[in-house]
Amino acid sequence: MSNPNPRTWNATTLVLTAALMVAVAWIAYPHIRAIVIPPEITAAARGRALAAELGCFTCHGELGRNGVTNPGSRYKTVPPFHEGTIMMFAKSDQELREYILDGAPAAKLANDAYRKEMREQALRMPAYRDFVDERDVDDLVAFLRASSELLYPPDGPAADGEELAHELGCFTCHGAMGSGGVANPGSLKGYIPGFYGPDYAELVRGDEELRSWIYNGGIKRLADDPLASYFLERQRVQMPAYGGFLSDRQIGDLVAYVKWVSIESWREMPLQ
């Protein structure tokens, strides 16, 4: 029996090795990406993910938007996080923290009538003090603030832009108040970026690029970059182009709102 040709053997080995490396890289891609290109999601986006892990949406509804029925409660349901409902129960960030850590603010827990009211209802807010650390609580509070719909710009184009963003469903993809972090398979970082933070600073350099994102669904700077364009074409969720559907004024309103969010002055705004 003749021995196999060494050159053929080496070529076959190289092909198989290359195929194996590609397969391993494909499987490991999300993990490698997280090391080479670390995610830079916002605190609110981390808080949303953590809320899902902790089971918050089991009672407060999907993304905290529709609480389930709660027999025995005077409110009939578990309260949601949005449309200002949160302010019926917590008047400050500190009270939000106490709800997360102890199930209710200290002042309420010290009240006999409140404790009796809680005992009479089927569902009660659990205490997570032994399950979360300080950063976790910060992230959860950031998510609650973003979801509250109580942080909004003053009257004018930015306020009109916020209303239009709700109508267009922008927050469905970009997260509550544009906090980002919603999964997007195939994208460079694996998620849809928000309206503020490091990702926004990388993707939007000036008003013209922001307007182009809204009008055209993209920008020339990234379209001309081979690596960036590869991921933009490959990602499953694509930014829609609204140029043919909105007036110049409406696009200007959206630009004003996103710019207001990106400045992040709302971080110090009370939930009032």
Image (spheres, helix red, strand yellow):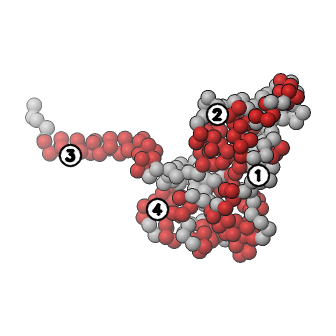
Give the alpha-carbon distance from disc 2 to disc 1, as whole Å. Answer: 24 Å
User: Where does the image place residue 81, in percent across and percent down from the top left?
Assistant: 76, 44
User: Where does the image place residue 164, in percent across and percent down from the top left?
Assistant: 75, 63
Find residue 78 and report its image quarter. top right
Indicate which disc residue 271 carries: 1
Q: Which residue is mark 2?
A: 54
- Residue 21 appears left or right of 55: left
The amino acid type of the residue labelled 4 equals Ala
The amino acid type of the residue labelled 1 equals Leu
- Tag nearer the camera, 4 or 2: 2
Could you say which is closer to the camera, residue 191 or residue 147? 147
- Residue 122 appears left or right of 229: right
Residue at 32 percent across and 43 percent down: it is: 21
- Tag nearer the camera, 2 or 1: 1
Q: Is residue 101 above or below residue 207?
A: above
Q: Are marks 4 and 2 in contact (CB under 8 Å)?
A: no
Q: Which residue is mark 4?
A: 228
Give the alpha-carbon distance from disc 4 to disc 1, as whole Å. Answer: 39 Å
Earlier sequence position, callout 2 versus callout 3 = 3
Circle 1 Cα neighbour tier, 10 Å, few/some/many (<14 / 14–19 / ≥20)? some
Q: Can residue 122 be seen at all in this image of the molecule?
A: yes
User: Where does the image place residue 10, in percent across and percent down from the top left?
Assistant: 18, 43
Indicate which disc residue 258 carries: none
Q: Secondary structure at mark 2?
A: helix
Earlier sequence position, callout 3 versus callout 4 = 3
